[in-house]
Image: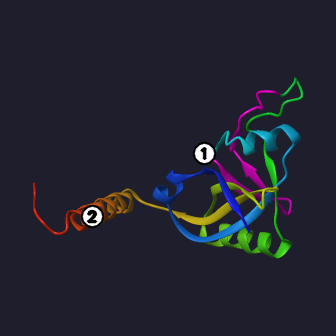
Amino acid sequence: MERKNVAQNRRARFEYFILETFEAGIVLTGTEIKSVREGRVNLKDGYAKVEGGEMWLLNVHISPYEKGTHYNHDPVRPRKLLMHRREIRKLLAAVREKGLTLVPLAIYIKDSRYAKVELALAKGKNVHDKRESVQDRDAAREISRAARRGGREDD
């Protein structure tokens, strides 16, 4: 199973605690899939929502296909996600009861054919949690620098 990443939402891992991830298919039009294959996707403000027993991906920007005609798609239209009914029910319960959010982490092409989205069940971080993440990242960077230097102090 080959997976070619098209777009990633790096900010999501900084803004949220990722509790669980899910894979969902996306219903796209002809020009949308062409734009996705070119990597012209922005997940920054995107989120998913359950409405009427169906899962929808909202605020994800897929740029219009450059070689398209006047039949091009709306860049931020709601897109239906394809998931099993039991998964949708599970996510709906988690979002309602625990106040969690569904955030897209990545869009990728699977097996050179299907556009998929990696959704995360996430809990928002507070300001101090974000500061802690930055401190942890800086500490890890210092440790890797020290390891590359071989433990010698050349500062």
Residue that numbered label 2 is attached to:
139
Residue that numbered label 1 is attached to:
45
Q: Left or right: 59 with respect to 128?
A: right
- The quadrant holding residue 125 is bottom left
Looking at the image, which is closer to me, 135 or 141? 141
Viewport quadrant of the C terminus: bottom left
Label 1 crowd (10 A; few <14 / some 14-19 / many >=20): some
Viewport quadrant of the N terminus: bottom right
| Residue ID at (67%, 72%) | 94
Label 2 crowd (10 A; few <14 / some 14-19 / many >=20): few
- The quadrant holding residue 132 is bottom left
Q: Is label 1 in a helix, a strand or a loop?
A: loop
Q: Left or right: 154 with respect to 49?
A: left
Point out residue 63 in the picture as x, y percentages from the top left corner.
71, 34
Amino acid at circle 2: Ala
Point out residue 31 in the picture as x, y percentages from the top left corner.
84, 37
Circle 2/circle 1 CB separation < 8 Å? no
Q: Which residues are magenta?
A: 44-67
Is residue 110 a member of the stretch shown in magenta?
no
| Residue ID at (75%, 39%) | 35
With respect to residue 13, does 85 lie above or below? below
| Residue ID at (74%, 75%) | 90
| Residue ID at (79%, 33%) | 74
Closer mark to the observer between disc 2 and disc 1:
2
Point out residue 110 in the picture as x, y percentages from the top left corner.
75, 60
With respect to residue 36, does 89 lie above or below? below
Looking at the image, which is closer to me, 78 or 111? 111
Q: Which mark is residue 125?
A: none
